[in-house]
Image (cartoon, rainbow, N blue to C red):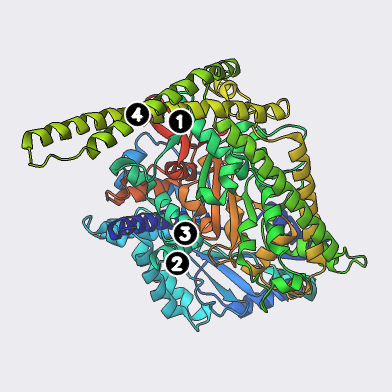
Amino acid sequence: MDLISKRCALEILEYWKFVELLGQNDLISESEDNKKLTEEVLKGNDIKEKRIEVYRTLKSPDFDAAKMLEEDDKAYNSFEFSGDEITFCMGKIDRNLLCNYLKKYMGTTASEGVTGDIYPEGTAIAWFTFKTDIKGNYINFSFRLSPILWAINERTEGSIQNLSYRLNKSTYDSIIRQFEYKLQGKNVSEFLHEVYLEIEEKYLRADFENEEQAGILKYVRYNSKDSLEHDRTTKKAGFSYGTYSKDLTMFTDGFANNTITDKTAFGKKLGEYVLSAYQNTHGKPFSERTSISPNEDRQAMRKFFEYALDIKKTPLGTLPCDEKVPCLSQVAINLITDESAMIPLFSVDSFGGKDQEFVIDEVVAAYVVRKAEQMAQNEHPDDAFDNNYRFLNDKINDYGILVISDEPAEGEIRFTDRTDVDAYIAERVLPVFDEPNKPDYHSIRADFLAQCKLVRNMRASLGSLCKAQKNLPDYPRDRIEEELNILPRLKSEVDSLDSQIYDLENEIINISSQKKPLFFNKRAEETKQALIDERQKRLDVLKEDREKKNKRYLSVKNYRASLDTLDQFEGKTSFVDHDFLDKFYAGSPYLPSPWITDEYDFEREKLYHLAIQFLNAFVMNSNKMKEAFLAYDAFDATILQLLLVVTPAISTDVHSAGRLLRMVTEKETIGQLFVDKSNEIEAQSIMGLMFRSRKATLFGGPEENVPEPAFETTILKQALISDQINNYRRGLSAKFCADYVNPYGIYRGADNKEWTGFPMAR
């Protein structure tokens, strides 16, 4: 990527960070269930719960943590153990009040026609938040100033000309650092009053009615030491403003310092993903596009299907299924899994359902086999690891799968936070190592490798079928057979041309070899050369004609051998032939996948089962893996990659992903990322997931339904003016950006110019 493009991409990423920054959470509030629990505890009644949340409303910013804790120790004597932290949310502003102010003083076209309350009654935000330990000592780097109040202040107080330089996360972070310097090493009683008044004076406008509440604090109490310790090991992410801010910052930093670079295929696509909306109006597509449509040239479609459905691209493993994989689904599977295709960022038009299930399930099966192949290179499982429990062969990690979906598939392993991981490791992983009858690693490995060889040999045999079909023209079978009748005539024409060429070559030789006269005769020499040139031109024409006719002859001659090969598989599989293309151009909703036979599928299913057995044997016989899971104390990159050996795929939703993977900060930890309903996800929300991945496939419908940002964000982001970000104001879906860089798709829309993802179903 050139320097100008990189600067443009960084500006877009900073804009996304700013938008995420403005996504401030509502003020914390106590749930009705917790209120009831608290009432029961204060009455002295026993309850089953092991923890309760304690909320305190502060009437003023003068606060004595020791006194509060002493009072609560008496009131909650059955919950005598206090958590480690106190969360403070200071100040309170009604969100509808803020919206009215923004509409009145900063309204843009985005606020035209917006009347009445935007939020439910009582919805509010805090001026600032921070955390202390249970004794009231400030916890470093926990202070957060309301980004909305900060942005309003910058927009109101500063000049419009340099607004774009001030309304960004870097400026906000510099202000946070100033507060950090004031608060570090102090008790809440030493700074709260001063900070409260400072923020009130600088960031509260006259239009903001200050409610009679200085703030709210929250902490947790436990009925036993064990309950407290359990929460300490499963601590969830703390208070934050933007759901994806941390992940987006991680990606931006990696992009800025060349951790993400276009020297890799995926790094290049990620840069293009960021620039997609800008490029959409300022330039051409990043790569050549192939439209998969009956409106396209028939010969081009035939070449595409012959390429994408070639048996060599079909995965070695497959799941048992009563239904055959549809043709377009098989194309998507092949393009995703084929390492030579170099399509690390792929998008698919899909509304869920069977077609999408086929793709994900088949990719999982393919990667199970590939992962097993890589791991089977080890004579003993422990030979695969270094001393830090990382795989010596990093290619194993290419095949770990993370699925982002709100609708988990039946039976899949699904995590939403660290608690789920803890439970899975404790209940499903660790007991495996203690089973008395462990499978024999060496025999299962031998069976798996033998089956791999068998399937590869079958695939090579079917490869001759692909090659034979490519030799045939796009004609019906009866017309091809008619062509065979012209072989004698073609052979005769070639023989005749051979004879003429032979005679003419001899004539040229004879003319050239004639003896020269004793005395040089210029006229005679010119006549001789002209004769040779004339004969040579005739010879060149004859040779060119002979080459064409011979090529035609050999081509038709090969038809017979190709037809004989196809006859051997008649009724066993379909081909990319004239009938196949006719059905495609007729808009057939279902096309069977060519080249694949029932026998081949049976052996592929068997290979998948043997791969699963081998991976189980690998895990159960690995002391290194047992040591790693016993020593587990953080859900980091190492544990994630080991879990992706225990289970083929892990699932979570896009909102939980950042919290779940917050300790996974290494790039390319995950092999394959799948994102469902990416047309309903904002483009910037998956940047951290793609940073952690090596490949990504995004599913979703062609119609965008991107969640609208908060009203305050919609207004405030209009203050930024730049050619680089103008096309990003409306909000972009992750699907739009992935579609734009995807080389295979289809044009849709009223003007047939809207490029969308691969059309898996039509």
Would you name the residue on which mark 2 appears?
259
Give the quadrant of the C terminus: top right
- Of circles 2 and 4, the one toward us is 4
x then y, percent, for residue 608: 76, 49
From this view, report whether residue 507 is shown above or below residue 312: above
Q: Is residue 352 left or right of residue 607?
A: left
* Chain-order first, disc 1 or disc 4: 1
In the rendered image, residue 542, in percent from the top left (x then y), is placed at 33, 27
Q: Which mark is residue 248?
A: 3
Residue at mark 4: 503
Residue type, numbered disc 1: Ala
Whether residue 592 sits left or right of residue 187 in the image: it is: right
Which of the two discs, 2 and 4, labels the residue nearer the N terminus? 2
Q: Secondary structure at mark 4?
A: helix
Q: Which mark is residue 300?
A: 1
Circles 3 and 1: CB atoms closer than 8 Å: no
Which amino acid type is shown beneath numbered disc 4? Asp
